Amino acid sequence: MNWQLITAAERTAFEDNGWLAITDAVDPARVDALVGAIDQCSPTRRENQNVADVLWRHDAFLELIDNPKVLPKVADLLGSPNIWVNHSHYNVNYPDATTSPPRYYWHRDGGGIHTDIGDVVRPAFAIKIGFYLTPVVTTAHGPTYIIPHSHQSRAPLPPPAAPPDEVEAVPILIPAGTAVLYDGRLTHSGKSINSSSSVRKAIFIQYAFRWRGTGSAIRSGGSCSASPPRCRTSAASRRGEAVSIIPVQTTCRSARRW
Ligand SMILES: O=C(O)CCC(=O)C(=O)O
């Protein structure tokens, strides 16, 4: 395997911007296989699906974990090989599947950890990789928006419906097959308007220090043709509050969870 470590320029870009795009991280044949796997696991249309805990659902998803163009850079940036995948999900965003008024769900990854730590610039705890499987090359494609430099700020989150221009957010525009590394502290949108004619599909895998808990419960074995674990989210866990020493955030097919 041809492991690709982080370059000095990439490190500077990631540390300054809070994100880094690696184009061609996934070759076209694998992109097709991943799209097929999502279609197999989500055969019926549901508006704006956000399916958590995806790795057990299909081997194609599992193969993303040790992507040689991504994993070494993540380990380098976190500064430790003592990391694990503590959260995964895929998002399927249909054209025109908007709420009214549109909501962007601005957030930092990790939920409660940011408020728990308090009013300081927090250290980096996790990096989430967005593997974009369909082209997101214009703002019509429902891009992820990020608020520049928010990983280095203590600014509170904007209201969910605040439009990108109002909060000076910028879209991440990339071709299919790109992996985008996001610093977990970066404020970004949970969704945006897809006014194109194509469905946007992306898979997100989060690597965190091994001492971090799960972002969603993690199941091993099985496949998406087997029955999924029961959805057991509680109001408290949805708010990102600690509810138990053993995480109860079990998968929910359409849960919105970051
Ligand atoms: O689907 C997107 O554009 C963003 C997904 C997201 O917010 C996340 O994975 O934390």
Image (spheres, rainbow, N blue to C red):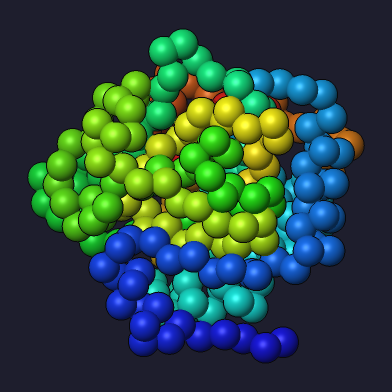
Q: Please name the residue shown 48% across and 56% down the image.
A: 128
Query: Residue 132: image x %, image y %?
Result: 62, 52
Location of residue 195 with respect to 23 vertically, above or below: above
- Lateral position of residue 27 relative to residue 13, left or right: right
Figure check: 154 above or below 78? above
Report if residue 93 is visible in the image. Answer: no
Judge whether residue 170 can be spotted in this image: yes
**Residue 203 position (above or below residue 161):** below
Residue plotted at (44% across, 19% down): 102
Q: Quadrant of the N terminus?
A: bottom right
Image side of residue 204 versus residue 73, left or right: right
Residue 73, position as x, y percentages in the image: 49, 77
- Residue at 60% x, 76% y: name it: 69
Position of 233 with respect to 53 (left or right) is left
Q: Residue at image x 78%, y 64%?
A: 28
Q: Nearer the viewer, residue 36 or 41?
A: 36
The x, y position of residue 244, in whole percent, is 42, 34
Q: Is residue 52 left or right of residue 100?
A: right
